[in-house]
Image (cartoon, rainbow, N blue to C red):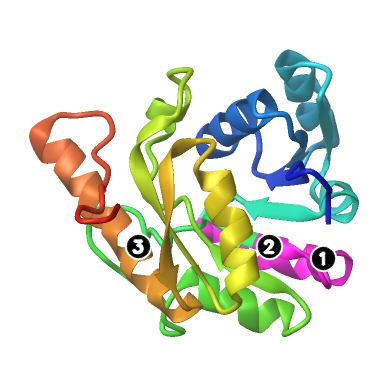
Amino acid sequence: MAHSGKHTIAILGGTGDLGSGLAKLWLAAGHTVLIGSRSAAKARDFAKELGDAAQGYDSLAAAKAADIIVLAVPFSSHDATIIEIKDVVQGKIVVDAAVPLVPPKVSTVQLPAEGSAAQIAQRLLGDGVKVVSAFHNVSAAKLHAGDRADCDVLVFGNEKESREIVIALAGEVATRGVDGGVLANSAAAEALTSVLIGINRRYKVPGASIRITGLP
């Protein structure tokens, strides 16, 4: 694990809307960011645009070199990506930001039989990996606006220490991270994404999000 609160973070799907938005803000916060993609060349080209603290690799190499791995991939490639990186992420934190959206009805909640994408990740990776679930309800448009997104980030995981690390990372890209409890609770945030997509469409806004009230 990195010292002084700074980490080497691999973002798989780092050239996508969510992944690239997270990358920009974590780079600004002083972390080393590895952009992971199915195409190493595409990842390297994008990393050059981000600056010297970013590097581009294929997904496997990025996951191997980092101490925290963020899954910002579409649900359609979620399981395959996890299986690919399984052996190189043992003992590490894997942050699952995937949402089980099922086109064309992405504004309708359609959770998998296993309960959530995060629970699938934990089952596939095994007990040697600390799976934390977060960043489902953060608008990519807000991340790309250049400042922290004005929303809360619900963070779930079965181990308190891992949750706290990701809560701190969430506070660097959004208003704050909020401890949502065990990994099974991730189903609530994953389902909420479809609700927010529907709200965006009906109210014609780019990034509806959430704020937890009543906290100090």
Q: In this picture, which residue range is highlighted in magenta?
A: 75-94
Q: Nearer the viewer, residue 24 or 48?
A: 24
Q: Which quadrant would residue 162 be assigned to in this image?
A: bottom right
In the picture, the disc for residue 189 is: 3
Give, as a three-letter code, the residue at label 2: Val
Tell me if 43 is positioned left or right of 24 in this view: right
Q: Nearer the viewer, residue 13 or 39?
A: 13
Q: The N terminus appears in which quarter of the rendering? A: bottom right
Q: Amino acid at mark 1?
A: Val
Taking the spot 49% from the left edge, 57% from the top edge, the residue there is 134
In this orientation, which residue lies closer to the viewer: 28 or 213?
A: 213
| Horizontal and vertical percent position of residue 81 | 70, 60
Query: Label 1, label 3: how many angstroms apart (C-alpha)?
Result: 24 Å
Q: Earlier in the sequence, mark 1 or mark 3?
A: 1
User: Disc 3 residue type?
Assistant: Ala
Disc on res. 94 = 2
- Distance (Cα) linking label 2 and label 1: 8 Å
| Image point (39%, 42%), residue name | 138
Residue 88 placement (x, y as % from top left): 88, 65
Identify the main secondary structure in magenta.
helix
Q: Residue at x 59, y 46 (%)?
A: 169
Q: Which residue is mark 1?
A: 89
| 3 in relation to 115, above or below | above
